Amino acid sequence: MNYVKPAVSINAEHTVNEAITWTVVALAAVIAAGGYAAWCTANGANFQGSYNVDDKSVAIGCIYP
């Protein structure tokens, strides 16, 4: 049995500032979606959210019964 040294490949470099920026954006999005979900529930609707990785899109909304 031969030893094969593990290798790591990196597709793109990211700076610390980019990581912080995207973390803040993600947290703001979660807080906004949570507020919207609470508003839907308070108005008698159901909150629904979805995302599409291929299109890089997110959809959120209220569904009234």
Image (cartoon, rainbow, N blue to C red):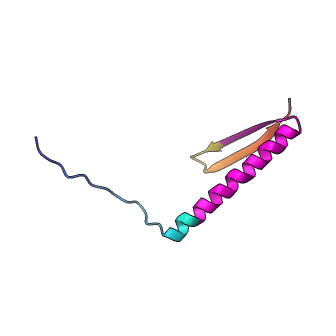
3 part of magenta stretch: no
From this viewpoint, which residue is outermost toward the top?
A: 65
Position of residue 60 in the picture relative to residue 43 (left or right): left
Residue lying farthest to the left in this orientation: 1
- Considering only vertical position in the picture, is 24 above or below 4? below
Q: Work out which quarter of the rendered image holds the N terminus and state it.
A: top left
Q: Position of residue 16 (x, y in %)?
A: 50, 69
The residue positioned 69% from the left and 54% from the top of the image is: 29
Residue numbers of the magenta segment: 21-50
Asked which quadrant contains residue 45, the reply is top right
Q: Position of residue 22 (x, y in %)?
A: 59, 61
28 left or right, relative to 14: right
Where is residue 7? Give x, y as percent: 27, 55
Q: Quadrant of residue 24?
A: bottom right
Report the number of discs: 0
Q: Residue at x 56, y 65 (%)?
A: 20
Task: Give the main secondary structure, helix, strand or loop, of the magenta stretch.
Answer: helix
Q: Residue 6: where, in percent of width, then height?
A: 24, 52
Is residue 47 a member of the stretch shown in magenta? yes
**Residue farthest right in this picture:** 43
Residue drawn at 37 percent across, 60 percent down: 10
Q: Left or right? Give the position of 27 relative to 14.
A: right
Residue at 81% x, 39% y is 62
Quadrant location of the C terminus in the rendered image: top right
Looking at the picture, does residue 14 appear above or below residue 39?
below
